[in-house]
Amino acid sequence: MRARVLVRPKAGILDPQGQAVERALPALGFDGVSNVHVGRLIELDVEDPERLPEMCERLLTNPLIEDYEIVASAQ
Amino acid sequence: MSSSTSSLEERYRQLGLTDGEYARIIERLGRAPGDVELAMLSLMWSEHCGYKHSRRLLRRLPNDGPHVLMGPGENAGVVDVGGGLAVAFKVESHNHPSAVEPFQGAATGVGGILRDVFAVGARPIAVLDSLRFGEPRSSERSRYLLDRAVAGIGHYGNSIGVPTVGGEIYFEGSYEQNCLVNAMCLGLAPHSRLIRSAAAGPGNVVVLLGALTGRDGIGGASVLASAELVGSEGGDQAKRPSVQIGDPFTEKKLLECCLELLDRELLVSLQDLGAAGLTSAASEMASKGGVSVRLDVGRVPLREPGMEPFEIMVSESQERMLCVVEPERVADVLGVCERWEILATTIGCVADGDSFQVLDAGVVIADLPVSVLVDDCPLYDLEPVPFAGALYEAPAAVLTGSETPAETLLALLRSPNLASRHPVFEQYDPIVQSRTVRRPDEADAAVLMLPDSSAIAVSIDGNGRRVACDPRRGAMEAVYECSANLACVGAEPLGLTNCLNFGNPEKPHVAWQLVEAVEGLALACEQLGVPVVGGNVSLYNEAPTGPIFPTPVVGMVGKLPHAEAAGRLGFTLAGDAIALVGPFEPSAVGSELSKLRGLPPVGELPVADAARIRVAHQAVRSRVRSGAFHSAHDVAEGGVAVALAECCIAAGLGASVLLPNGLDPFGEAPGRAFIVSGPREALAPFVVIGEVGGDALTIDGLLEVPLSELRDARDAGLREWV
Amino acid sequence: MRFGIVRFPGSCDDIDALQAAARVGEAVLLWHADHDLHEVDAVIVPGGFSYGDYLRAGAIARFAPVMAEVEEFAREGGLVLGICNGFQVLCEAGLLPGALLPNVSLKFVFRQVELEVVRAVGPFTGSLGFDPPTHPAPPFPRLSIPVKHTTGRYYAPDDELDRLEAAGQVLLRYAPGHNPNGSLRDIAGVCNESRNVFGLMPHPEHAVDPLTGSADGRRIFESMRSHVEQHVLA
């Protein structure tokens, strides 16, 4: 099946990419934006979705600094 | 294939061929070309590959010298540096791709020039960049291009482990739409590992190494590199899909893999894939070897499904190399590639004759004489007409002329063209590979140690504003200045490479700039005895507002016997005397100060006395080597006053000087004169003008500025924009 | 004394580390795909961009076959030094505490920085020739060593940082005003609890010769040699 893993910086961790985007938006006229965070999206086809959490813990994310969310969708 | 005449015309014109060129193709082939053939021909006959407006002119450049091992025509020029070692080097432009997508454009510019250097068997050991943008103060686009191009250069060079040891950046309005990104690479090789690109040995196998082939830069050579940029946003946006994406990680593996293949003597010849991809690489290899080549596009590993044969033949996907291998060594080659995780595929063979055959699943889909592809591209004579009057707009005035000399000096130090490059250089790794004896800002040329404790030095220069004033003398000055930079570290020139960045050569005044500049380069090279071992031409650098400043960029490589004797630009010792060495009759024409005062780039540049320049360079070189001079710095943009300020800032030491009568402190005449320091007795034969010491720069009767103010002004100039 | 320098695809400072180590002992390259440390006395995981820094710096390299051997070697008390990308790899592998995040500037930074030697004890900083040799108080002795990286901001949760400091695992800090990347508590280099694994973002292998900048980094390699000679080979 097709799976998506959303990876984002853990809450409270300094996220300079998010901050840079947050600073850039008002400059383009987009006011009222806050709490911007930049993460990653990993898409993969997996035979055994049960193993996704383990993949996330071991390779796809660094649990010390990143949170993940698995979004599975049947193909 | 059964298209009507009008759509055929449309097609070859869209591919950049003129009616005359198409007629010439029919005449040479004795038939109409097929689709794949037309795509191949249009690229090989483009300005970018065929050099059709510059090839005749380039014959004027001297390329013989006692140290030259490989001259123009190979992937890179090569000079002997002693001890059984050779240095390969070349500068190349990636202007139009960088104007479209500056990060990837600059990154792949670096990737391309690295491949040129390891294609001759040399390990890349240094990168330098020559960049031109519009005014950062007034142009957001220019700030964006600067930021992204610098990031792209750093991304590729830093990630692949090749130090960026120097470079130059200028900001002028004429580069606003058409920025320049020229990258130079140096490589080091034992003589035994040098390899040429000529294919040889009928029956030998052609192997494609590296990345998968995708739809990158399809038509890049004719559409991106040889047509004037469409100025509107829409034009740039529409071109975005054909931008090449760089992958320094794959190139790092490819580099190590190729060098191991060469160390194990497994290759007959090697060539990088650049503009026009497989078409250009294979036809150049065949042409140089006087053989035929046959490729099967069905064997080329693809990144995307459904690619058409013509797309495979002209794809500019990065990080690929083509090599020729004897059949009995193919297994060994594939083994080395597997170890480096580099994809290697046999895609064809070498045969006798003069034909370039392309097959798809066994069916011949293109069959062209190699000579037609490579040699029959029409060469055009330029029709130069000198341009009288102001071709370029006057820049916005920053100074009125009523400022005090101290205010003028600070304004010059703060101007983006003269300010400290530190905010940019800090984004590059200058020390990886452990050879860097002089980092940027420490000396006028970068110095890299060789295994026998000697060293090579390298510098890159080119001031478009001065060439705009006076193309011949402006180009000569670029050569003088590089040689002066090398003299300041104690190095003697071995050879040079150049990149000619000009506007549309079909316009008579641009043709005149080009002809005059090439003449200037040739004259200065002859005067100083420096051969041109390679180079690159980038034409059609124009926006609707007009051409760029004519910008010949010169990269020069030299040698010094002892790395530990390499010179520095900053003063070193309080109490040292300061002297002005060299024939120096500066003028305000084309100077940085004239620009700050809002004057257009017009007027005659000062005459140069070649014999006296040679003597001055020799004097500085030998005294830096012997240690008699404690520091040496050439007087360039901003004149003597700025040069003195730079020597003070680099040292954290002040100076007190009295300038010779009537000398314009801000006048320029690059490449002629030097500010040197040392013990008074060592400087006796020269014009001693003062002494190192204190915490201010004092020019008697003119100005006194504290060191901290000088440093703050110079530090602030670019920091604001980077 | 024999150093082994791991070479991953994308390692850039491997040869620099090899040459630096060769100034104080023997040095050999260790291939990433081998399950063999060739009986070296210490392992250096060098700088560069292993696997292009793709996914996260060090994330893929830490699963290379040779790393299984390095982890085993470390568990048995062998000396492992991670420099820059090597530090990132060792953190990803869990051999060192914490993680390296993108610089606050989000840009690559090259700079010659001043480091303070916070703890002059143990195999890596124990014999830097400082007097007194153990746990100097401020002013700390300094080293001039270059940094060059995009992902060098040292991070660990607050309580973890407290624990590291209390346990004396922070060996090097950026001197005041020299923190190039926003590392928490100015941490430039940390070791594991048993003190045989050390990672730092600055590049000691690029500070082994005054001609190319500084020779201060050489003392870290010398320190490793003395430790091995006194405790392993003796």
Image (tube, rainbow, N blue to C red):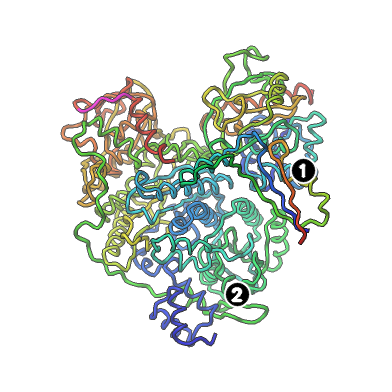
In percent of width and height, residue B660 lies at: 19, 32
**Cβ–Cβ below 8 Å for labels 2 and 1?**
no
Badge 2 element = helix
* Residue at 44% over, 59% down: B96
In percent of width and height, residue C28 lies at: 71, 39
In percent of width and height, residue B235 lies at: 43, 63
Residue furthest front as drawn: A32
The foreground one among C146 and B107 is B107
C-alpha span from label 2 to label 1: 42 Å
Q: Residues within 10 Å of mark 1 (few under 14, many from 20)?
A: some
Task: Tell me if A58 is positioned left or right of B146 in this view.
Answer: right
Q: Amino acid at mark 2?
A: Pro
Q: Nearer the viewer, mark 2 or mark 1?
A: 1
**Quadrant of the rendered structure where residue C47 is?**
top right
Q: Is residue B704 magenta?
A: yes
Q: Amino acid at mark 1?
A: Arg
Q: Chain of mark 2?
A: B
Q: Which residue is mark 1?
A: A58
* Residue at 46% over, 44% down: A27
Badge 1 element = helix
Range shown magenta: B702-706
Task: Tell me if B325 is positioned left or right of B46 in this view.
Answer: right
Residue B309's disc number: 2
- Main SS, magenta region, reads strand
In percent of width and height, residue B647 lies at: 35, 31
Task: Tell me if C18 is positioned left or right of C175 in this view.
Answer: right
- B628 up-or-down from B619: above or below: above
Confirm whether residue C234 shows in the render: yes
Q: Residues within 10 Å of mark 2 (few under 14, many from 20)?
A: many
